[in-house]
Every structure is written in C-alpha cells, then in structure tokens.
Image (cartoon, helix red, strand yellow):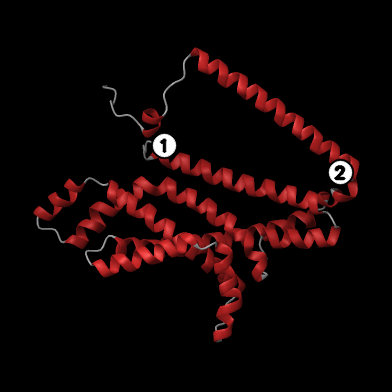
C-alpha cells in the first residue's frame, strides 16, 4: 500500500522539535508539575486550617439519597442539553441555508442573526426568556426557559460550523452533478450536505460541550438541573466547597467523555485535524 502524501493541519503548523527543544519542553513540564503540586499543597493546607476538610462537610456523600438527588439533577442537565442541542442544530441548519442562499437579502439577514446570537452572552438570553417573555402572557415550562436560550446562543456557531463543512466539499462535485441534470436542492441534499456533516461532526460534538456548560445557568429559571440541586445541598448542609468540588468533577467527566466522543468520531471518519 502506498502511504498518503497528504499532510494534516497539525503536521503543517507543528514541526517536530529537535533534541534541544525536547529537553527544554521536558524541563518546563517538570517545573510546571512541581509548581502545580506546590500550589495544591498550599490549597489543601489552607483547607485544613479553615476546617473545610472536616467530616461534617463530606459525610453526607456516603448517603445514597445524596447521590440519588445529584443523579436527578444530572438527568435534568442531560435533558436540557439534549433539547438545546437539537434546537440549536435545527435552527443552525436553517441559518446556514440562508447564509449560502443565492438571495442577497436572505444572506444579509442570516449574517445579522448569526452575529447577534454569537455576540450576546447566554445569560442575557436566559434572563430575556425568564423576565421579558412572561410579560407578553407567554408561559413556558422551566425546561424550555433554559433550553431555548442556550440553543439560540449556540445556533449561530452551529450555522458557521455547518457552512464551513459545506464550503469544504469540492465545488467540482456540485458542478458535475448539475451537468448531469440534477436539481440544485437535490445536489445539496444527496451530495453536498452528507459530506459536510462528515467533516464537521467533531466540531458539532465540541459545541455540545459548550451547550452542557451553558445549562449550568438553569438555576436562574429554577429548573432542577445539576447546579440547582447542588445549591439545595449547599443550603441544607452548609458545605459549599465539597459540593462544588464534586459537581465540578461530574462536569469534567461529562465534558471529557464528549471530547473523547469527538475524537472517536473523527478517527472513525478519518478526519484529519
């Protein structure tokens, strides 16, 4: 078999270091680890001094009811993230279609909406749905009050990711299909978009990580997600540090698994990054 001569983006931008540079990197790594361990030592020492490691702040984690309560919050986070991700994908798809449309007005409006959603913080969208929308007599369940603003905030980025995938498909394929008499929309649905999705699936999964993190604002609308339930535990046990540390670890594990899923999808589809 012949080896492919194609170079990935990483190979182009990153040159393998020489022996001297490798030694410097090794020394910098060792120094960084030492400083990190030193910082960790002082943090744990300070916790011991202030009594934050006392058993009363941690013993309730031995109770099944605590983990059941956190598990219910985790299910709420997954539900909000899944709904927000689906809505963001659908709205981003239509924004992308408008952005690549042949009509200039449609492209301009799509650009305005995309830049608006990308430029406004997610929290402002959440407050809008929580405080402004009810003034018009529109009542929404807490799940939608968190899922919709998170989806709107992510839709602009999803649209740009999808557009980049469409632009990555060689233009010759579209021209060849049109020359065979295929209609424009048929070419897009059957030839262009399937390949575009293949290119951008890892980026879409990475965007889902941001969606998951944005759902942590659900406490604003009193939706029982992981953060909201964590706040209940803090108020019940007066254990701010321990609860937030455990919840942080849960979020880290979730986002790590999503990142691994992104890498797995990229490797299965032989996407070079």
Q: Can residue 263 be seen in this view?
A: yes
Q: In which quarter of the image is the N terminus?
A: top left
What crowding class fits label 2: few (fewer than 14 Cα within 10 Å), some (14-19), or many (20 or more)? some
Tell me what residue is drawn at x 61 percent, y 23 percent: 28
Tell me what residue is drawn at x 86 percent, y 43 percent: 53
Observer-nearest residue: 12 or 237? 12
Left or right of 74 in this view: 124: left
Q: Where is residue 41 in the image (x, y as percent from the top left)?
A: 80, 32
Q: Where is residue 176 in the image (x, y as percent from the top left)?
A: 13, 49
Q: Residue 44 carries which label?
A: none
Q: Which residue lies furthest to the bottom in this view?
A: 137
Tell me what residue is drawn at x 78 percent, y 56 percent: 66
Q: Which residue lies furthest to the top in this view?
A: 19
Q: What element carries label 2?
A: loop
Q: Where is residue 84 in the image (x, y as percent from the top left)?
A: 51, 63
Does 152 sit above or below residue 244? below
Q: Residue 267 carries which label?
A: 1
Answer with mark 1 or mark 2, whichever residue precedes in sequence.
Answer: 2
Q: Gap in Å between the C-alphas at discs 1 and 2?
A: 43 Å
Does 139 sit above or below residue 265? below
Q: Is mark 1 on a helix, strand or loop?
A: helix
Observer-nearest residue: 59 or 196? 196
Q: Position of residue 182 (x, y in %)?
A: 14, 58
For label 2, the residue is 53
Left or right of 41 in this view: 126: left
Tell me what residue is drawn at x 56 percent, y 44 percent: 257
Q: Can residue 223 be seen in this view?
A: no
Residue 46, quarter of the rendered image? top right
Does 199 sit above or below residue 36? below
Asked if the residues shown at circle 1 and circle 2 are in contact, with their CB atoms under 8 angstroms apart, the answer is no
Left or right of 240 in this view: 180: left
């Amino acid at each position: 078999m012949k080896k492919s001569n194609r170079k990935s983006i990483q190979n182009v931008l990153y040159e393998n270091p020489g022996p001297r540079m490798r030694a410097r990197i090794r020394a910098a790594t060792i120094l960084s680890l030492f400083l990190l361990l030193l910082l960790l030592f002082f943090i744990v020492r300070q916790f011991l001094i202030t009594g934050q490691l006392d058993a009363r702040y941690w013993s309730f984690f031995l109770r099944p009811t605590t983990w059941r309560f956190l598990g219910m919050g985790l299910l709420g986070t997954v539900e909000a993230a899944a709904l927000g991700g689906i809505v963001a994908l659908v709205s981003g798809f239509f924004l992308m279609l408008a952005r690549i449309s042949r009509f200039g007005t449609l492209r301009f409006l799509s650009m305005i909406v995309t830049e608006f959603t990308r430029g406004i913080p997610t929290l402002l969208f959440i407050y809008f749905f929580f405080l402004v929308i009810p003034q018009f007599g529109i009542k929404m369940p807490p799940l939608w009050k968190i899922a919709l603003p998170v989806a709107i905030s992510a839709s602009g980025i999803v649209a740009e990711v999808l557009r980049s995938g469409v632009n990555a498909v060689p233009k010759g394929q579209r021209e060849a299909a049109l020359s065979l008499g295929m209609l424009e929309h048929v070419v897009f649905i059957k030839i262009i978009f399937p390949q575009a999705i293949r290119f951008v699936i890892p980026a879409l999964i990475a965007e889902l990580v941001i969606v998951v993190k944005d759902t942590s604002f659900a406490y604003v609308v009193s939706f029982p997600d992981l953060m909201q339930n964590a706040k209940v535990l803090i108020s019940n046990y007066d254990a701010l540090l321990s609860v937030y540390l455990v919840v942080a670890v849960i979020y880290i594990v979730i986002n790590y698994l999503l990142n691994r899923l992104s890498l797995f999808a990229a490797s299965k589809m032989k996407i070079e990054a």
